[in-house]
Image (spheres, rainbow, N blue to C red):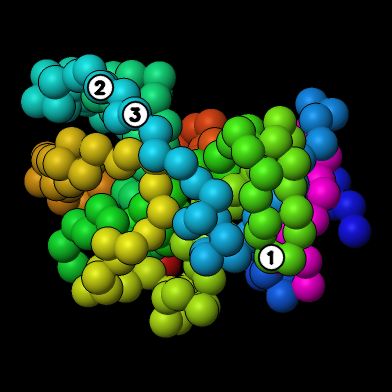
């Protein structure tokens, strides 16, 4: 079975992830750039295939960035990127804030759960250095594996109620490439302290990317506009 990762995957990736885990836990797939890879979607296989990556340092002074924000702003361009630079952790900050705004019943900032539920990486590419067997398939050295982090982190075989955001969950076992948990927790906490009434100001625009999972723009407003009186 071969899968084409097109626009439908980008905009409805979790539906595709659920289907892949059930029907084709390992299959060949073509990326938008034409590269063919082995697609891994189950937690157990992903955990075996994923190799540790170095944690890249990120720049930014959160207090300085917040001081410079006045009025409506874009969560990615005006806050997360100045704090974290051009780094995937900026998308984790944005994804986390968006999900917290959409789940006002959730208390606190559990970065591990925010990352598990809606992490900054849709997949990670790894070149096999020696032959390996995954999900009953023998993969030769030199071939490329695409580890679907978003799928593995919502695998019901590993996480109960995987599609639910639950900030009380112990999500320490989620797969990640380095979340900079302290930075993300501090950034989200200070943002919410500075703007306690922060709200989305329109629908966020999804990033057109199969590797990075996030948004290209997220307009927000510090003070939601009240509905006009009847």
Q: Residue at x 59, y 51 (%)?
A: 148
Distance between the Cα atoms at labels 3 and 1?
Answer: 27 Å
The residue carrying pointer 2 sits among few (fewer than 14), some (14 to 19) or many (20 or more) residues within 10 Å by Cα, namely few
Q: Position of residue 18 (x, y in %)?
A: 66, 70
Residue, far front: 130
Residue 113, x across and y down, in percent: 31, 61
Q: 143 or 162, which is in the foreground?
A: 143
Earlier residue among tags 3 and 1: 3
Numbered label attached to residue 135: 1
Q: Is residue 29 magenta?
A: yes
Residue sitting at 79 percent across and 26 percent down?
Answer: 33
Residue range in magenta is 23-32
The residue drawn where x is 59% and y is 65% is 42
Where is residue 146 drawn, in percent x and y?
A: 65, 43
Q: Write down the residue under mark 2.
A: 57
Provide the residue designation for mark 3: 54
Residue at 22 percent of width and 18 percent of height: 59
């Amino acid at each position: 079975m071969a899968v084409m990762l097109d626009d439908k995957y980008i905009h409805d990736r979790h539906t595709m992830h659920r289907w892949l885990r059930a029907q084709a836990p390992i299959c060949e797939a073509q990326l938008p750039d034409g590269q063919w890879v082995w697609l891994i979607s189950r937690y157990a296989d992903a955990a075996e295939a994923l190799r540790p990556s170095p944690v890249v340092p990120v720049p930014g002074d959160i207090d300085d960035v917040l001081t410079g924000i006045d009025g409506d702003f874009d969560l990615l361009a005006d806050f997360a990127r100045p704090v974290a630079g051009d780094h995937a952790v900026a998308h984790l900050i944005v994804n986390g804030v968006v999900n917290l705004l959409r789940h006002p019943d959730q208390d606190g900032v559990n970065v591990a759960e925010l990352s598990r539920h809606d992490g900054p990486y849709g997949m990670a590419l790894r070149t096999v250095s020696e032959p390996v067997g995954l999900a009953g398939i023998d993969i030769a050295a030199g071939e490329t594996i695409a580890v679907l982090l978003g799928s593995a982190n919502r695998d019901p075989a590993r996480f109960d109620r995987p599609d639910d955001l639950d900030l009380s969950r112990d999500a320490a076992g989620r797969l990640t490439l380095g979340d900079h948990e302290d930075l993300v927790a501090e950034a989200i906490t200070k943002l919410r302290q500075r703007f306690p009434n922060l709200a989305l100001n329109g629908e966020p625009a999804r990033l057109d990317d199969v590797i990075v999972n996030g948004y290209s723009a997220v307009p927000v407003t510090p003070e939601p506009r009240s509905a006009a009186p009847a």
